[in-house]
Amino acid sequence: MMISPEGYYEEYLKGKTKEQIMTVIRGLKQEIGRLKNTMESPDYGVKSIMHPSEDTRLHWSREYLERAKQAFAEAGGTYTLSKSEEKVADFDANMDAICKITFSIGGFFGGYRSYVVELSDRLKAYTKLWEDEEPLSLLDGDNEEPFTKDTFIAALRDLHIGEWLRRYSTKRFGYTVCDGTQWELKFEYNNGHKPVMFDGDNSYPYNFDKFQMLFGIDETEEDEDE
């Protein structure tokens, strides 16, 4: 069972100097990175997942990190963002300016299906495979209501996409896979911000399944059908 952020503060941060709190912050950032690497490994899920799961621990480690940063400021420290944190902050700050999202996934032989979401005053979604285009109805999994622009952006925000690597490959785990599945994700903006892209080759972010579900893609159902 995980403790609350305030419980974490009482046990690990209260009464500490800013130097001691910075040590805690570094440890939490390392733990978050380790948990993501574990979940992104091709071998993840082969063995039984212990509880609390990596996903749960990641969620709470993120909460603890925010509380630790707050405690650091209260102790007189000035937190400086790392290069990767600057990228995250920039992505998050421009989310409301996203005007188009294009997510493509597939393989050389089966073709690549694209899922396109256009965000202006309303939300328009459609899929494309080869030259065929079909309208796409996107439902909010929390209430089964159609997504609006605001609720779709809020769901994206919950996925912390700004933390994703720009490229995912099995090579970082010592694997080489020929063919298989490739994917690409592109965000376009209406405020002059340059497009942001992510892609992968048989390798995926730790919460990729949750991301796909925003587009109506449920990998668990596909696995059951097989």
Image: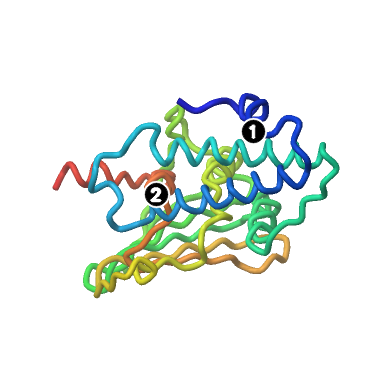
Whether residue 129 is visible, yes or no, is no
The correct choice, above or below, for 216 with respect to 50 in the image is below
**In the image, is residue 177 above or below residue 95?**
below
* Residue 98 horizontal/vertical position (percent): 62, 55
Residue tagged 2: 212
Q: Name the side, left or right, on which 126 lies relative to 147.
A: left
Left or right of 67, for residue 156? left
Relative placement, left or right, of 95 versus 107 is: right
Q: Secondary structure at mark 1?
A: helix
Disc assigned to residue 218: none
Please name the amino acid that badge 2 sits on.
Answer: Gln
Which of the pair 17/86 is nearer the observer? 17
* Residue occupying the far left of the picture: 226
- Nearer to us of marks 2 and 1 is 1
Which numbered dot is residue 12? Answer: 1
Dot 1 amino acid type: Tyr
Residue pictured at 61% horizontal, 36% vertical? 64
The 10 Å Cα crowd at callout 1, few under 14, some 14 to 19, many 20 or more, is some
Picture quarter containing residue 73?
Answer: top right
Quick one: SS at disc 2?
Answer: helix
- Rendered location of residue 198, percent (x, y): 49, 65
Which residue occupies the extreme right position in the image?
A: 76
Q: CA distance from mark 2 to mark 1?
A: 37 Å
Say above or below: 146 vs 129. above
- Residue name at image x 72 percent, y 66 percent: 192
Instruction: Report the residue at 78% width, 40% height from top.
Output: 17
